[in-house]
Amino acid sequence: MAVSLGQISKELFAQKTRLFLTILAITWGTLSIAMMLSIGQGLRVTFAKAVANTGQNLLIVQQGKTAKLFRGSHKNTAVSFHKQDLQAISKLPDVRYVSPQYSWEAKVTYGTKTNYQPILAVSADYNKIHSIDIQSPGRFISPIDEQQYSRVVVLGNKVLTDLKLKITDPIGKTIFMSGIPFKIIGIMQEKSQISAGRTTPDANTIWIPSATYEMIKNPTSMPSIAITYKDHTNLEVLENQIQRTLAFNHNLNPDDDSIIEFKESAKQQNTFDTFFLGMQIFLGIIGSLTLAVAGIGIANVMYASVKRSTRIIGIRMAIGAKTYHIVMHYVLEAIIATAIGGAFGLLLSGGLIYIIDFIPMNGPLFDTIGKPHPVLSGFVIACVVMILGLVGFLAGLFPALKASRIDPSEALSYE
């Protein structure tokens, strides 16, 4: 004996007001859980993008101090990086791009405007390491700039604002840094960013060729080295290789973990992912409770339906309907009611997210990480559908079990 969809529909819509209120509750519960999961997903994506914009597979190597005696070296001796360290690291098989990082703050002047700005001297590969795109027209530092010790600069997209300069076409203009003229060759495209290894975001930074800086300042050491490693790289192995390479170059103990310090963007990314995943799960649980309350309404409708159809159930069982036929009938009825409310809830969620995208969000936080957008992703929809299915199944199961235990002889005499 097959389950009759016509009979299910007739029983389901017999009490239209109660069904309408129940579907409304399911719609509200679905809207709640979908929006909470979408907001959590949006925050995860936003912060992941902000970390990735600092640099994919980024590893910063910083100078440390010795902690172990080794072949005449003493404890607490500062380790200084030099060009041969940079060259040695660049030859490691899992290193893709490498750049020195000389950072300082300089007096920057254009015309009568003056300000102190963070400066970073880097190599031509730095834009690939830090995911820096340049506005058109314009370009980043090139190998030729390095070879010719060119006095050129690339500006973060907020530097002109920091300097309070209203230059309509800055490319080719000259600014002075500590009295030395530099030609502007590029402006960075705007991007969200959570800094890794530096406190100053790229938007507020000025870049010059590292070779130019070395010629002008003649530094005694290289404060830090930025690295991009290959996707398949075992980061722990790579860090050990870098440590041993530098230890060999400086005649230090290769097992001395304190001679260098590492800052990993991947670790920062994992921290954010874990935090926002936990927050998303928490929001999902809150939304699920709202949906569970609506599921109680579905169960009440099913109990009323069972009571009203007691005689019909008895007739069906008398003519051969099995227990699973009765259970399937009322479970399916509950799932259909839940699906109707769930469909409306998901449609409303999509519309609400569309409206939220037009709401302006301004402030220092949004300037740093970018504007968060709720994301009604396939993962979110799958979670909502799975929870809806569970709620609908449980809401129909208990009334269905009650219906399956009805005695046909008593049901036939039921009024």
Image (spheres, rainbow, N blue to C red):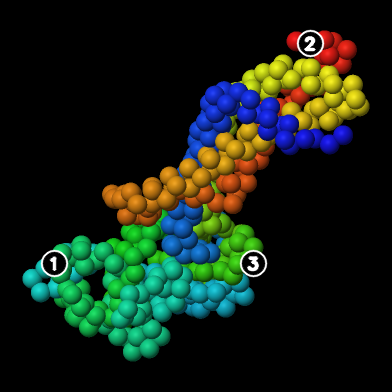
Per the model, the C-alpha gap separating discs 1 and 2 is: 94 Å
Residue 215, image x, y percentages: 31, 82
Q: Quadrant location of the C terminus? A: top right
Residue 80, placed above or below residue 386:
below
Residue 191, image x, y percentages: 37, 63
The residue type indicated by label 2 comes to Tyr
Mark 1 vs 2, N-terminal side = 1
Judged from the image, the secondary structure of the residue bearing numbered disc 2 is loop
Judged from the image, the secondary structure of the residue bearing numbered disc 1 is strand
Residue toward you, 398 or 165:
398
Residue with the most extreme left position = 112
Q: Is residue 180 left or right of residue 300?
A: left
Q: Which mark is residue 114?
A: 1
Marks 1, 2: nearer the viewer: 2
**Mark 3 closeness class: few <14, some 14–19, many ≥20 residues within 10 Å:** few
Per the model, the C-alpha gap separating discs 2 and 3 is: 71 Å
Quadrant of the rendered image containing residue 189: bottom left
Judged from the image, the secondary structure of the residue bearing numbered disc 3 is loop
Asked whether residue 286 appears in the rendered view, the answer is no
Q: Residue at x 64, y 22 (%)?
A: 301
Quadrant of the rendered image containing residue 211: bottom left
**Mark 2 closeness class: few <14, some 14–19, many ≥20 residues within 10 Å:** some
Q: Which mark is residue 232?
A: 3
**Mark 1 closeness class: few <14, some 14–19, many ≥20 residues within 10 Å:** some
On the image, numbered disc 2 is attached to which residue? 414
